[in-house]
């Protein structure tokens, strides 16, 4: 089941916080960079992120989540996390599809991921996102930026 995560519920916030840590630790290993901002944030930072969080639940267990913001008709996917015990079950695909369908009226979707995060890059490329560039954010760490325009979504 896919639904909005309610941050008024402390249990839901903690569950998301723990899920995010488990998922981003895997990405940190893939890209060999352990200073990923979500790994350094507190529960309060997460709660105050200003992002909309959608969760994927299996038997009431949060197994994946996606977050995004909307500014000036652009959806920016901020986070995509799946618990390592639930990799390769299509959860990220379902979450991405959910956000795209629920905001199909908006013309542009953006997302970024570590250049060495092949699973994430393949997900976005498979879904019609195009690489718009790679940026070195700290010495030796590159982030790949992707964009999908409405005309490409149809």
Image: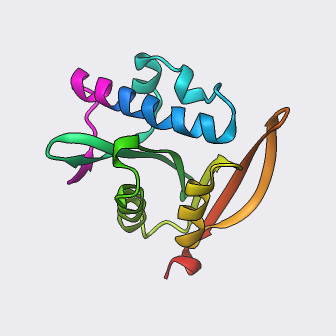
> At which x and y percent is residue 110?
60, 57
Q: Is residue 31 left or right of residue 142?
A: left
> At which x and y percent is residue 115?
71, 50
**Visual colour scheme:** rainbow
Q: From where the camera sits, is residue 14 visible?
A: yes
Query: Which residue is painted at 44% across and 69% down in the image?
Result: 105
Query: Which residue is painted at 24% across and 21% down in the image?
Result: 10
Residue furthest left as drawn: 59
Looking at the image, how many numbered discs can be counted on the residues? 0
User: Does 93 appear in magenta?
Assistant: no
Dividing the picture into quarters, in which one does residue 152 lie? bottom right
In depth, the one of 7 and 72 nearer the eye is 7
> At which x and y percent is residue 91?
35, 56
> At which x and y percent is residue 13?
31, 26
Q: Is residue 142 left or right of residue 6?
A: right
In depth, the one of 104 and 20 nearer the eye is 20
In depth, the one of 105 and 79 nearer the eye is 79
Residue 112 vertical placement versus 83 (above, below): below
Dividing the picture into quarters, in which one does residue 128 lie? bottom right
Q: Is residue 110 left or right of residue 81?
A: right
Q: From where the camera sits, is residue 83 visible?
A: no
Query: Which residue is painted at 20% across and 54% down in the image?
Result: 1
Look at the image and give the residue range highlighted in magenta. Answer: 1-15
Residue furthest right as drawn: 139
Q: Is residue 149 left or right of residue 139?
A: left
Query: Which residue is painted at 69% across and 34% down in the image?
Result: 32
User: Does 5 appear in magenta?
Assistant: yes
């Amino acid at each position: 089941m896919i639904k909005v995560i309610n941050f008024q519920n402390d249990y839901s916030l903690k569950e998301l916080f723990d899920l995010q840590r488990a998922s981003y630790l895997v990405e940190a290993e893939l890209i060999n960079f352990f200073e990923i901002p979500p790994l350094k944030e507190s529960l309060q930072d997460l709660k105050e992120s200003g992002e909309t969080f959608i969760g994927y639940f299996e038997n009431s267990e949060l197994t994946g989540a996606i977050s995004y913001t909307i500014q000036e008709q652009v959806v920016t996917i901020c986070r995509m996390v799946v618990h390592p015990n639930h990799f390769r079950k299509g959860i990220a695909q379902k979450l991405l599809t959910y956000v795209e369908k629920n905001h199909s009226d908006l013309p542009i979707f953006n997302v970024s991921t570590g250049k060495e995060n092949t699973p994430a890059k393949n997900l976005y490329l498979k879904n019609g996102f195009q690489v718009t560039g790679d940026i070195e954010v700290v010495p030796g760490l590159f982030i790949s930026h992707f964009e999908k325009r409405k005309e490409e979504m149809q």
